[in-house]
Image (spheres, rainbow, N blue to C red):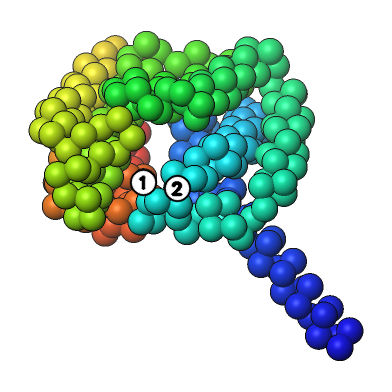
Amino acid sequence: MSNISSELSERRGSARLAAALESLRPYQWLKNTLVFVPLAAAHRLGEPPLLLRALQAFAAFSLCASAVYLLNDLWDAAADRMHPHKRLRPIASGRLPRSAALVLAAALLAATLAAAWPLGAAAGAALGAYLALMLAYTLRLKAIVLLDALTLAGGYALRVLGGGLAVAIIPSARLLAFCIFLFFSLALVKRYAELALLRLRDGPATHARAYLLEDQEFIVALGTSCGALSVLVLALYMSSETVARLYSRAGFIWLTCVLLLYWISHMWLMAHRGRMTDDPLVFALKDRMSAALIVLMGATAWLAV
């Protein structure tokens, strides 16, 4: 009997550990690779000391993001249980106890501080601003139409800024504007996709947080416009003297603008057809067309160098 109890205890422990790891959403850490953008834009990825600091920034933002995901899931547990997909999350489904989630979130925040401490005050301030913004999003801002999407876009821009400050390379205003327009568009496509998904279940009464079904046309117009603006900002950057100095074959880099425009349009089309059931960046990892376009954008940038 004791062997059976021991085996059941081990299984519960393993299941709880798996639920804890799932709640950290490690697949979302891909977003934190934005901290490497300033280093890559300056063509200094090959410098080991700077690359190490960028890796530290990546670790700090990843730990911080996972803590925020836990706190967000704790706050949203009741609402998540009513959602067709989010009800399966570890906290909403009861696979991860609330007390364990709170302890884990506190440990992650302590680890975030330890990882960020060597990066200096400026990078730490950017990380602190990111944490404050995401907590405000969790507690209030995500319930405010448009401000929720703009907050998410600001979070992406802070990743870029934090990565730049960690290696003492200040991102240009154009780079930050590009990030805000692009990720505002992707945040809106996420809301649009949620409405499209919930429409099948709730019909005309559909709403995704503060967005209503009748908002879909407005979301499409605003989101696609911001996506196009991000391409325009990138094109303006491509015509600058900085690009002429950094790229020996700058003509290739213009193909990146065309490919980016294609990708943004593709993402919106997939959301319009109801095929986007995940976070846009997670969907892009699974979508063959998106993967091909991302590889081609990387190839054109490499050819330009």
Q: Which residue is mark 1?
A: 279
Is 181 positioned to the left or the right of 20 in the image? left
Q: Taking 214 as reference, is 96 left or right? A: right
Which residue reaches farthest right? 2
Mark 1 or 2, nearer chain start: 2
Amino acid at the residue labelled 1: Asp
Whole-number angstrom distance, CA of label 1 to CA of label 2: 15 Å
Identified at 53% across, 52% down, the residue is 92
- Check disc 2 and report its element: helix, strand or loop: helix
How packed mark 1 is, by other alpha carbons closer than 10 Å (few <14, some 14-19, many 20 or more), is some
Quarter of the figure that contains the C terminus: top left
Where does residue 53 sit, x and y in percent of width and height?
A: 65, 29
Residue 249: give x, y in percent of width and height: 26, 31
Give the quadrant of the N terminus: bottom right
- In the image, residue 107 lies at what x, y percent? 75, 39
Specify few, some or many for label 2: CA neighbours under 10 Å numbering under 14, 14-19, or 20 or more: some
> Which residue does the image show at 59% across and 48% down from the upper left?
24
Residue positioned 16% across, 49% down in the render:
203
Residue found 51% across the figure and 26% down from its top: 139
- Image quadrant where residue 128 sits: top right
Decide if residue 109 is in sight here: yes
Side of 73 where 288 appears, left or right: left
Residues at marks 1 and 2 touching, judged by CB atoms closer than 8 Å: no
Is residue 238 at all visible to an observer of this figure?
no
Tell me which amino acid carries mark 2: Asp
From the image, state whether disc 1 or disc 2 is nearer to you: 2
Tell me where residue 154 sits by quadrant: top left
Badge 1 element: loop
Q: Is residue 208 above or below residue 86?
A: above
- Please give the residue where the numbered disc 2 appears in the rendered image: 80
